[in-house]
Image (cartoon, helix red, strand yellow):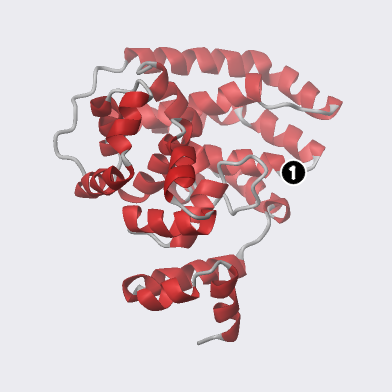
Amino acid sequence: MDKDFEKWLKQDELFEYYNANPEQQADIYEDYQREKEYIEPKKKVEWVKWMVQNPEMAEKYYPLLVRGLKDRIKGSTHFETANIIQEIPQNFHIWAPEINKLSGKYREKEIKEYITLLNDVLHEWQFSTEIEQQAVESVRPYLTEQLEYWNNELKALPPQEKNTKFDEKSNVILTNLEQYNFSDYLKKSGLKEDNIFQLIRSHSGNELMPYTIALLSEIKFLDYFFKEFTESKIDGFKQLSKVFNKTPRRIKGNVNILNPQSKEDPVQYTSFNYTNIVKNELKGLR
């Protein structure tokens, strides 16, 4: 075994777990390689510029555009941030036709992501310098107009039929969560089991695990889980790895990145991209 890899396993108390779970060894080693190759966001300014200037390619190869844009803005200098902000309305004529070609749930998802981006720039993000503040004010009328456009597009969407062919993996996750009193927790929290199950079942593929973690965090189930069923955070990550059939490192990254101060790689760990989506979905359920 590679000595550096062995050291990495031991620092996260994964050495015994790795040896006891041969079915996850390839994925665990891949996690190790990703961390070795990770570049801090502040060193990726050129990538940000490319993303803004090539939205179609960015959407194809980096579909969670809002996630990447948020992270790059946080790691950019003031004038670079201002430049990115002022580029947003100029790309409307490219993004709008592409989104309008879509239909169904995917169209709804893309519109919500665009609305989140505009809301964040207009209302959520705190810009500390005059350079950034002036950039926002210079495009505020255009962003406000575009926000109104997308809100109207969202309202005009026809009701989506409920998906009856759920991803089997979502059912496995829900079954695994029951060993931690998930249904009882939902009832005590005033949340309808069917509604929460439907939210989880409406996701699949690569987004299923990070979305579900964002949801579990928002309803405070993760706090309950770590307090009642684990001896430590590391122990909790190992248990959740069995729930989701993902490596403990993938679980750890997606849990930790929900903390705004996290230094986890936002390209690899994407749960925070679903935070605002989850909040909006839960508003109508409480």
Instruction: Please say if 213 is above or below 20.
Output: above
Q: Quadrant of residue 25?
A: bottom left
Whole-percent x and y of residue 78? Answer: 80, 37
Residue 46 appears in the rendering: yes
What residue is rendered at 49% in x and 75% in y?
Answer: 15
Residue that extends furthest to the left in the rendered view of this protein:
164
Q: Dot 1: few (<14), some (14–19), or many (≥20) neighbours within 10 Å?
A: some
What residue is rendered at 58% in x and 45% in y?
Answer: 51
Whole-percent x and y of residue 222? Answer: 46, 41
Whole-percent x and y of residue 249? Answer: 49, 61
What residue is rendered at 37% in x and 75% in y?
Answer: 20
SS of the residue under disc 1: loop
Whole-percent x and y of residue 7? Answer: 60, 78
Left or right placement of residue 34 versus residue 189 in this view = right
Left or right placement of residue 230 versus residue 157 in this view = right
Could you tell me how many numbered marks the image carries? 1
Instruction: Please say if 257 is above or below 137.
Output: below
Nearer to us in this view, 54 or 134: 134
Residue 97 appears in the rendering: no
Q: Mark 1: which amino acid?
A: Ser
Task: Please name the residue that numbered disc 1 is placed on.
Answer: 76
Q: Quadrant of the C terminus?
A: top left
Nearer to us in this view, 66 or 95: 66
